[in-house]
Image: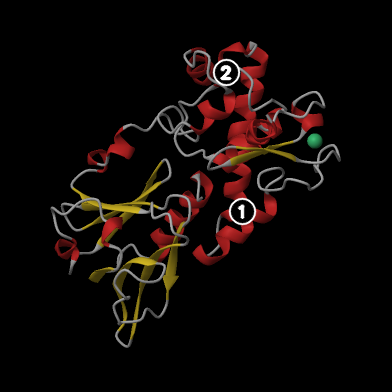
Amino acid sequence: MPELPEVESLVAFLRQQAVGRTVSRVDVAAINALSTYDPPLSALHGQTVEAADRHGKFLDLSIGPEPLHLVIHLARAGWLHWRDPLSAVPPKMGRGPIALRVHLTGEPDRPVGFDLTEAGTQKKLSVALVLSPDQVPGVARLGIDPLDQEFTPERLGAILADAGGRQLKGVLRDQATIAGIGNAYSDEALHAAKMSPFRGASKLEPTEVVALHAAIVGTLRDALDRASGLAAGDLKGEKKSNLRVHGRAGATCPVCGDTVREVSFADSSLQYCPTCQTGGKPLADRRLSRLLK
Ligand SMILES: [Zn+2]
């Protein structure tokens, strides 16, 4: 799933490539991907893309003089593919990975634009056309952005103190608490902070809060630095090749040489290094232990 660094990089890419161009047409191929119907997508036709922004993991294109906002959530398997040239043929309705195709004006003989695609059978990618981004419920409930100057160690401390009995992993991934961190960068930040994902969030010492804050911001900034300047098509591979523990069960921890381990849940999994994060003790794999009972 694209998280804060990837969405931020897509936004930077769209600022260069899409802002200033005019929308000539929008084709919807997956009707379920569209969560709004008023205003209609045809309201974008002939309007200029004025700005590209990010809210958590949401991408926001401002289009037109009193801008309408095309707000895109790529979900787990969605992606934005820049096309130059872009096929003028509308994508096939309800078939194939393309959910939406946005045609922009390019050179007279070479239209450009982008496709929003979603792999797999679970269709979660969602697009809304609204007057204000806050009209999208997922945007309205977002917590603080970890790259915001107001995201200080004190602020993180307050967030963790309010977390009750919740575990660090769940708090970091909760978009209503901290916006933009998902399964991958929560694994990475906890590995960098040398903390167990199951640690009680409200149990951290003040020095640990400072360390976790530095790990969160450092992990995201490093990922952003690596991604900056890359074209949309190169971002996914970049992310994968630089993760230290996430998605790397069975591989060697680059910090200590231990084997990266995994805990599986019904529809996701987390990865961690026992030596770095849990005093060498493997965490119980809940799915496995339930099967063994
Ligand atoms: Zn390690």
Image point (46%, 33%), residue name: 148
Residue 289 drawn at (x, y percent): 68, 31
* Camera-nearest residue between 197 and 239: 197
Image point (49%, 26%), residue name: 151
Q: Residue furthest right?
A: 257
Residue 224 drawn at (x, y percent): 57, 48
Left or right of residue 286: residue 136:
left
- Res. 221 image quadrant: top right
Residue 86 drawn at (x, y percent): 37, 78
Left or right of residue 38: residue 102:
right
In front of the other: label 2 or label 1? 2
In the image, residue 126 sits, relative to residue 107, either above or below, namely: above
Residue indicated by mark 2: 201
Residue 223 drawn at (x, y percent): 61, 47
Q: Amino acid at mark 2?
A: Ala
Image point (26%, 61%), residue name: 31
Q: Label 1 neighbourhood size at 10 Å, few (<14), some (14-19), many (20+)?
A: some
Which of the numbered marks, if any, corresponds to residue 78? none
Q: CA distance from mark 2 to mark 1?
A: 27 Å
Q: Is residue 95 visible?
A: yes
Image point (15%, 52%), residue name: 66
- Helix, strand or loop at mark 2: helix
In the picture, the quarter occupied by the C terminus is top right
Q: Residue furthest front?
A: 293
Q: How many marks?
A: 2
In the image, residue 142 sits, relative to residue 243, either above or below, namely: above
Residue indicated by mark 1: 239
Q: Amino acid at mark 1?
A: Lys
Q: Quadrant of ligand 1?
A: top right
